[in-house]
């Protein structure tokens, strides 16, 4: 049976909602040996391997404040912020029933939470800058694993003049959009011919439908595809 790979970046803006969101995903797709879906459900669909990439949230914000106050070097700020993602991963695992992993070599079945520091320290694939946040890190993980890339945040997507933009190409980001993605991500998506779907994580059923590749209210950010 073919395994569908999905990377979901869970933003720091969902700190309160994220445990319930992840547990809903675990209920639908299982987590490692914690299979909650029935045998009939599993036999009727493809298996899913869903990797949660944590945002930085309040943990990375603390690094930003330290940088503003003490003037950290780019390298120190970068790795401290990645450790902020690691802290968010600890929080998510503590508050949910999902298993954790620090490797993307073989993604486990069901839902797992990535502890990213060891992987990123070994690979060091991205510039050390505040323009590069967990959004681009999650996109890099999706690229490495050949996964569908979803960003779960606290808004429905990208807005222009108060209206939700259902589809936008990365080449259009010079226009005046209310954007909820980091400045480096559009160029990364364009260079790697990737797509990112921005979905409101306060509605878990939307995320589940998106994993099944069904239409939901969201913004699809398309990079040269």
Image (spheres, helix red, strand yellow):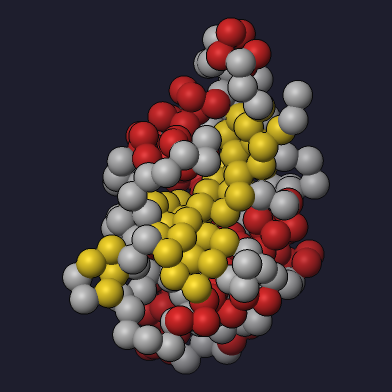
Left or right relative to 63: residue 128: right
Looking at the picture, how far across and down is residue 84, in whole percent?
50, 62
Left or right relative to 1: residue 101: left
Left or right relative to 91: residue 141: right
Residue at 27% across / 74% down in the picture? Answer: 160
Left or right relative to 19: residue 9: right
Is residue 115 visible from the viewing direction of this image?
Answer: no
- Where the N terminus falls, by quadrant? top right
Up-down relation of residue 19 to residue 120 (above or below): above
Up-down relation of residue 127 to residue 56 (above or below): below
Q: Tell me where residue 119 sits by quadrant.
A: bottom right
Up-down relation of residue 156 to residue 135 (above or below): above
Looking at the picture, how far across and down is residue 197, in whole percent?
47, 56
- Where the C terminus falls, by quadrant? bottom right
Looking at the picture, how far across and down is residue 91, in whole percent?
45, 45
Is residue 146 visible from the viewing direction of this image?
Answer: yes
Q: Tell me where residue 149 sits by quadrant.
A: bottom right
Residue at 78% across / 41% down in the picture? Answer: 106
Residue at 37% across / 54% down in the picture? Answer: 218
Looking at the picture, how far across and down is residue 4, in whole percent?
67, 37
In front of the other: 48 or 218: 218
Q: Tell me where residue 96 sits by quadrant.
A: top left
Residue at 42% across / 44% down in the picture? Answer: 215
């Amino acid at each position: 049976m073919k395994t569908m790979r999905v990377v979901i970046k869970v933003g720091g803006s969902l700190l309160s909602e994220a445990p319930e969101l992840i547990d809903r995903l675990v209920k639908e797709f299982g987590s490692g040996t914690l299979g909650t879906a029935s045998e009939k459900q599993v036999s009727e669909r493809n298996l899913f391997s869903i990797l949660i990439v944590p945002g930085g949230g309040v943990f990375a914000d603390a690094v930003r404040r330290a940088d503003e106050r003490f003037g950290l070097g780019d390298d120190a700020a970068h790795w401290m912020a990645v450790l902020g993602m690691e802290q968010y991963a600890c929080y998510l695992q503590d508050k949910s029933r999902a298993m954790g992993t620090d490797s993307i070599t073989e993604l486990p079945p069901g839902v797992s939470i990535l502890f990213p520091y060891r992987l990123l320290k070994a690979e060091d694939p991205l510039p050390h800058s505040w323009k590069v946040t967990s959004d681009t890190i999650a996109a890099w993980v999706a690229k490495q694993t050949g996964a569908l890339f979803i960003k779960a945040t606290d808004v429905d997507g990208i807005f222009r003049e108060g209206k939700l933009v259902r589809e936008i190409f990365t080449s259009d980001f010079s226009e005046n959009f209310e954007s909820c993605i980091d400045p480096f991500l559009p160029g990364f998506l364009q260079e790697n011919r990737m797509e990112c779907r921005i979905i409101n994580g306060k509605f878990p059923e939307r995320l589940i439908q998106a994993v099944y590749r069904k239409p939901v209210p969201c913004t699809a950010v398309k990079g040269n595809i």
